[in-house]
Amino acid sequence: MTTRTITGRLGGLAFGGDYNPEQWDEPVWKEDDALMRRAGVNLVTVGVFSWALLEPEEGRYDFAWLDAHLERLHANGVAVDLATPTASPPPWFSLAHPDALPVTPDGTRLTHGSRDTYCLAAPAYRNAARRIASALAERYGDHPALALWHVHNEYATLCHCEHAAAAFRVWLRGRHGSLDALNEAWGTSFWSQRYTTWEQVLPPRATQWHKNPGQSLDFRRFWSDETVAAYREQRDAIRAHSDRPVTTNLMLPAYQNLDLWALARELDVVTSDHYPGSPGLDAAADAAFHADRVRSLGGGSPWLLMEQGTNTVYDSDRVLGKEPGEILRHTLGHIARGSDGALFFQWRQSRAGAETWHSAMVPHAGPNSRIFREVTQVGEAVARLGELAGSTVDTSVAVLHDADAWWALGVDGLPSADLGYHGELSRAHRALWDAGVTVDLAHPEHELSRYALVVAPSLFLLSDASAENLRRYVAGGGTLLVQHANGCVDDRMHARLGGYPAEPLREALGIRVEEHRPLRTGERIALSDGSYGTVWSESLRSEGAETRAAYTHGMLADSPALTRHRYGTGQGWYVSTRLDDADYGALVRGLLQEAGAEPESPGLPGGVEAVTRHASDGRRWQFLLNHRADTVPLPDPAHDLLTGATVHELPPGGCAVLRRT
Ligand code: GLA
């Protein structure tokens, strides 16, 4: 990661959104200029889906319209985040290169008419993407309006075509070296799957029953590497002509196809889009989970919220409105956790096309609307926070996240269909958020010694290096909570032998799991401390750990369920079932106390979010977001950047950004 930043160029935090002027005409552009000034917009993303306009036929570019918009925006004091349009190839492209259309596992070749319809492994697509990125960079690389390059949009499309198969084989040769090693890694002695030539090896296409788990996992890894390579090609083509920072927008947590740690290493600034899946307090908690993850991917550096919605959250099959004040709270929630600004999808709500009903900063109703008024207020608030650009967030607690572990829980044939990845990760984060502490996400191979408490949910796959790293963390004084179904397979999806979880982590936990005993859907299992578990239980033996709670019934009666082991100067905790939410929350609060991890503001009631950003010169700003329906007195009043006055209380739904010395 380089230190290229955008806020220096903007002179403060970023505020704006995706701007698609090609959907409108001149009178609207004029109104856009005036409304952007009114709302305090200083950065817009242009060109995300403009390939058909920019290159109306293969090799013939038309930049005149984009020249005019960039000039207009620049004259209006608005900087540009210029996108390469490669997430949406035009119809001419798919007719000219049908082999570059993606193929689903069942062999269906998709066609144009939507977006994200391409195969990243197809040479025709990669060449076309590199060409248009290069042409844009050559033309606009040092344009005075340009603040940031936005490669592609939310890389996500998978493909199982012949190009993907060929590239997969090359990747597999690189990883395994020989066909014998691949056969060994994938366990092909079972079910007569042994490969005798490389041509027999395929992506995990539709099969009669369970697919080979090693093959499924390796395909995920391959596709992630292929995506990172595609990003780097565009980035490098841009860098040949431009010194402005380059990024691509991630989307968490629904972004299932990439090793985000690996992709984030390639970005000059990490950017991400956030659309919560449910309203109210859950949406605020989800925003915090999102923001903590994005910040962590960039190693703690300031990042940028590239998209959020003004009035919609998706609740599976409908869009729900945000309540008055919620746009501001969500925006501040992201900025509190390290975003140097907030952008939306999109500036003006479309009047036609597939996202006509997705929200925007200027809704169909126009500027005389609650939403635009709130957007203007949010713009004013963001403008008042300029002094904290570049500051960072300190934490002493981490939750572990690993793409391999996530993919491992997506293969066929697992012992329980109720084992989840994101659900467990977000639950761990939520328990810590409810307890008022700010959380990093960390990879299990990261250096962890600066954390007082580390929580490890859902690491079904745990590499040898990770197991040793976690042992070392505990030995060196850390408090580690390892949760059920952890360390069950190695990085080839081979079961750990001799007991779970992986050695040498077992040594730090002082236990040995002898048998998994998944529970039936809805079944609950009682523990001796009055708590309950669901989904999973385990028969485990203590090898030095003390039993903090035992199972009470059935075959597992009196055997350990929750254990603690003092090891080195730290302690390793193990919980072998999925505790009910309230019991899990109590366990996490107890561990925070044991580990000496203080909440951000001990004097505040639950439902008031507190996070602090720190500057390198010692200045600090404390964000306070009242998600409650009552007024909350502040134990330690201070100058509030949002109002310019000292605040003593937060009204229902109110926010403050207090300058602390
Ligand atoms: C994503 C995309 C946008 C838009 C929004 C709204 O984040 O990047 O183009 O589709 O979702 O759903």
Image (cartoon, helix red, strand yellow):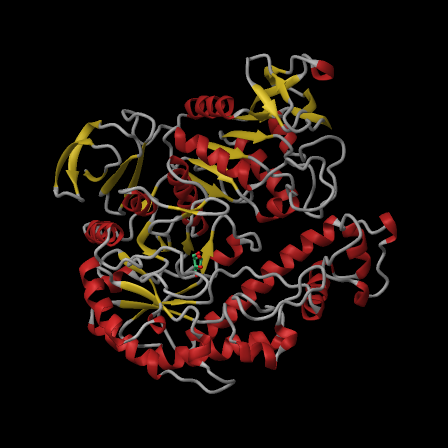
The structure residue drawn at horizontal position 29% and vertical position 45%, both measured from the top left corner, is: 332
> From the viewer's perspective, is residue 545 above or below residue 245?
above
Query: Residue placed farthest to the right in the image?
Result: 192
Left or right for 655, reference 275: left
The structure residue drawn at horizontal position 40% and vertical position 66%, both measured from the top left corner, is: 352
The N terminus appears in which quarter of the rendering? Answer: bottom left
Residue 348 rendering spot, x and y as whole percentages: 31, 62
Res. 452 visible in picture: no
Depth order, front residue of 512/424: 424
Residue 17 rendering spot, x and y as whole percentages: 33, 60
Residue 647 rendering spot, x and y as whole percentages: 15, 34
> From the viewer's perspective, is residue 216 above or below residue 120?
above
Residue 487 rendering spot, x and y as whole percentages: 65, 36
Left or right for 248, reference 128: left
Res. 167 visible in picture: yes
The structure residue drawn at horizontal position 27% and vertical position 72%, both measured from the top left corner, is: 145
| Location of residue 279 (image quadrant) | top left
> From the viewer's perspective, is residue 479 above or below residue 360?
above
Depth order, front residue of 424/404: 424
The C terminus appears in which quarter of the rendering? Answer: top left
Q: Count the marks.
A: 0
In terms of image quarters, where does ligand 1 lie? bottom left
> From the viewer's perspective, is residue 448 above or below residue 319?
above
Query: Residue placed farthest to the bottom in the image?
Result: 60
Depth order, front residue of 352/227: 352
The structure residue drawn at horizontal position 86% and vertical position 49%, both measured from the top left corner, is: 191
Left or right for 37, reference 19: left
Depth order, front residue of 31/196: 31
